[in-house]
Amino acid sequence: MSGQAKLELIDVHKSYARGKKRHPVLASISLTVREGEFVTLLGPSGSGKSTLFRLIGGVERPDGGTVLIGGADTTGQRGHISYMPQQASLFPWQSVAGNIASALATAGIERRRAAALAAEWLERIGLGEVADEYPQVLSGGMQQRVSFLRALLMPRSVMCLDEPFAALDALTRAEMQAWLLRLWEEERRSVLFVTHSIEEALTLSDRIYVLSRAPATVLREIEVPFERPRRADVWKEPAFVALKEDILALLERGEGRG
Ligand code: ADP
Ligand code: MG
């Protein structure tokens, strides 16, 4: 796994004011996402994962530390990543195709080309029939497919996905994981994915950073050893079960290696 780091965080830290005190959320986070790599941040609720995404996206500034995207310092700057949130956040007044096309146009793609790209890709992922529908008539899973496609097509070097399946029922979630895996394995974008599900992290990722509770640090970095294309029943492998137990124990102890 060689290649240039698409995203690099160096000693990023952040605290919020709570009354007169500072409440530290991220103690110190350093990590990298290489070209075409699927990296997951796995941490308990409240460990600062969404906060970290706001810092990477430049919506907020860290108290200290550096965000590098494609080797350039982008700390506190917007417009360098594409982002997929937990809830699809599609505009209800625009069609499915319109939602994607207008996002691409805002990102600088010429309008006619943006519309053509949206139509072509919706067809390709089997959503051609709903291209002209409004998002609210789609199921939650379908809305997340549209939201993922929008993030995928944005002309950005890194995709950040913040617990994109957390609001879906278990069956839809498993289908969505398989769908995302297939599409990602064809496209190989650089992805930083957030989840608190150990199985989801092991099923999808090349590498996992396990975060502690807030104030968050990286407890461990794990290379996921399973081959690509990854099998849907990879969870049956003894090595999967063993890794899952290791990570669970690590999260329960909440300590680093040693
Ligand atoms: P996660 O996404 O891992 O569940 P968050 O990043 O949403 O965690 O939140 C981590 C902690 O930071 C929480 O305790 C939350 O209350 C606090 N927090 C997040 N944003 C703010 C803010 N703007 N002001 C104050 N506290 C915040
Ligand atoms: Mg969150």
Image: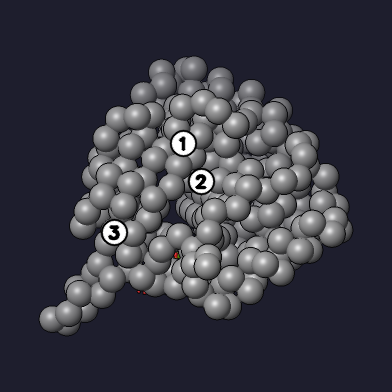
Q: Which mark is residue 158?
A: 1
Between discs 3 and 2, the one toward the N terminus: 3
What element does badge 3 sit on? strand
Residue type marked 2: Leu
Q: Residue shown at 43%/47% (left/top)?
A: 31
Colouring method of the image: one colour
Q: Which mark is residue 134?
A: none
Q: Is residue 143 left or right of residue 68?
A: right
Between discs 3 and 1, the one toward the N terminus: 3
Residue situated in front as seen by the camera: 236 or 132: 236
| Label 2 within 8 A of ligand 1 by Cβ | no
Structural distance between the alpha carbons of marks 2 and 1: 7 Å
Q: Can residue 159 be seen in this snapshot?
A: no
| 122 shown above or below 26 | above
Between discs 2 and 1, the one toward the N terminus: 1
Q: Which mark is residue 192?
A: 2
Q: Residue shown at 56%/20% (left/top)?
A: 116
Q: Are the residues tagged 2 and 1 within 8 Å (C-beta)? A: yes
Residue type marked 3: His
Q: Residue shown at 24%/69% (left/top)?
A: 16
What element does badge 2 sit on? strand
Q: Which residue is mark 3?
A: 13
Mark 3 or 1: in front is 3
Q: Residue shown at 24%/45% (left/top)?
A: 76
What element does badge 1 sit on? strand
Residue situated in front as seen by the camera: 135 or 203: 203
| 95 shown above or below 48 | above
Q: Residues within 10 Å of mark 3 (few under 14, many from 20)?
A: many
Q: Position of residue 199 (x, y in %)?
A: 70, 61
